[in-house]
């Protein structure tokens, strides 16, 4: 439990800082967050190997199997030059090997519209020819459907999923660039940008909680917010945000209070109460400070007047 709480503090801390990666994904190779997207470059035009690939890795809950995946999709944009060389693709980690799921038009996986955000749609269950590649496994093939992959490996544990770009070698200029806007795995949508659920600084409770859940992942979010007996934390999160907003707190201040309360080990109803208590205390302290400052300023003005006489 301590480890989970520690991870959550880090997530909320990042949310306060703004444009930062969340704990629900890790970047490798050339992958960097730029605005709302992760930019992935594959550069085979030079002798440097470290820029040949970029990847974004996602964790999956323990117990996940290939057969238990329900959704897998990406919103991405091939800005330079095309889908090619089996990239971009998903890699589903099974027993130290990968099931590949290619993005772009089947069956060649080239001809992606350039500089356009493309939605892969849900790839789980795809019947597209050759979109799934099980060639790393005994009895597998480069040209598989989802159903055939599940028939071969369905009961085996999935230990992680990557979105990978490494097809630069296949293009004339030996370079490929892809922007990744979001990835959805089993109903959890992972986003990468600074979207904190506010609009023009105005706190929208449902949106703030959705953003928080997207950053943390559904499981950790529910563990943090669900009151005992329920598995859905959205209600408690939204009511806490609404209460704090109505008390006049900014999004930044709410996130600070949240980080403090999580650090103090609060979850569920106790977390909501803790944030609410911090609202009242901080508001009172701010009022007291402002009153003190106003009094001091008045006294100063009075002294200045006295001197002028
Ligand atoms: Ca290179
Ligand atoms: Ca290029």
Image (tube, rainbow, N blue to C red):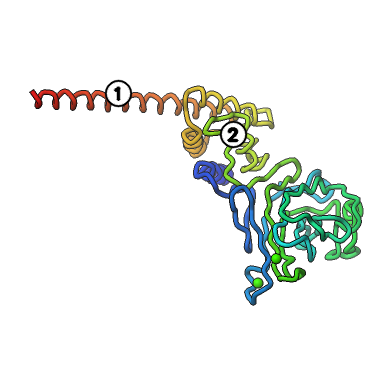
Is residue 160 visible to us here? no
**In the picture provided, is 206 more to the left or to the right than 245?**
right
Count of picture labels: 2
Q: Secondary structure at mark 2?
A: helix
Q: CA distance from mark 2 to mark 1?
A: 32 Å
- Residue toward you, 115 or 219: 115
Q: Secondary structure at mark 1?
A: helix
Q: Position of residue 180 (x, y in %)?
A: 68, 52
The residue sitting at 53% across, 23% down in the picture is 243
Within 8 Å of ligand 2, the CB of disc 2? Answer: no
Give the answer, above or below, for where 124 lies relative to 230.
below
**Mark 2 packing: few (<14 Cα in 10 Å), some, or many (20+)?**
many
Within 8 Å of ligand 2, the CB of disc 1? Answer: no
Give the answer, above or below, for where 9 lies relative to 226.
below
Q: Position of residue 47 (x, y in %)?
A: 64, 77
Q: Position of residue 289 (x, y in %)?
A: 31, 28
In the picture, which quadrant includes the N terminus? Answer: top right
**Mark 1 packing: few (<14 Cα in 10 Å), some, or many (20+)?**
few
Residue projecting furthest to the bottom: 47
Q: Position of residue 238 (x, y in %)?
A: 60, 28
Residue named by callout 2: 208
Residue 269 position by quadrant = top right
> Is tag 2's residue or tag 1's residue first in the polypeptide sequence?
2
In the picture, which quadrant includes the C terminus? Answer: top left
- Residue toward you, 33 or 56: 33
Residue named by callout 1: 291
Q: Are marks 2 and 1 in contact (CB under 8 Å)?
A: no
**In the picture provided, is 261 more to the left or to the right than 95?**
left
């Amino acid at each position: 439990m301590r480890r989970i709480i520690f991870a959550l503090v880090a997530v909320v801390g990042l949310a306060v800082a703004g444009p930062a990666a969340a704990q629900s994904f890790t970047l490798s190779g050339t992958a960097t967050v730029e605005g709302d997207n992760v930019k992935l470059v594959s550069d085979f035009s030079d002798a440097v190997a470290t820029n040949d690939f970029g990847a974004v890795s996602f964790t999956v809950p323990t117990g996940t199997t290939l057969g238990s995946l329900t959704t897998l999709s990406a919103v991405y944009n091939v800005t330079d030059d095309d889908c090619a060389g089996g990239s971009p693709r998903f890699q589903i980690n099974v027993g130290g090997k990968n099931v590949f799921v290619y993005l772009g038009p089947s069956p060649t996986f080239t001809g992606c519209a350039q500089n356009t955000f493309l939605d892969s749609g849900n790839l789980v269950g795809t019947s597209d020819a050759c979109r799934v590649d099980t060639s790393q496994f005994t009895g597998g093939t480069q040209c598989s459907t989802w159903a055939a992959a599940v028939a071969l490996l369905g009961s085996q544990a999935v230990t992680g999923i990557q979105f990978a770009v490494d097809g630069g070698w296949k293009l004339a200029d030996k370079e490929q660039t892809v922007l990744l806007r979001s990835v959805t795995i089993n109903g959890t949508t992972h986003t990468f940008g600074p979207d904190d659920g506010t609009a023009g600084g105005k706190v929208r409770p449902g949106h703030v909680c959705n953003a928080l859940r997207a950053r943390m992942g559904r499981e950790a979010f529910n563990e943090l917010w669900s009151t005992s007996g329920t598995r859905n934390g959205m209600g408690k999160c939204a009511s806490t945000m609404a209460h704090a907003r109505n008390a006049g707190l900014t999004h930044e201040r709410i996130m600070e209070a949240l980080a403090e309360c999580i650090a103090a080990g609060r979850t569920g109803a106790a977390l909501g109460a803790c944030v609410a208590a911090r609202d009242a205390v901080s508001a009172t302290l701010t009022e007291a400070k402002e009153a003190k400052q106003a009094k001091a300023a008045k006294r100063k003005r009075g002294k200045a007047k006295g001197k002028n006489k």
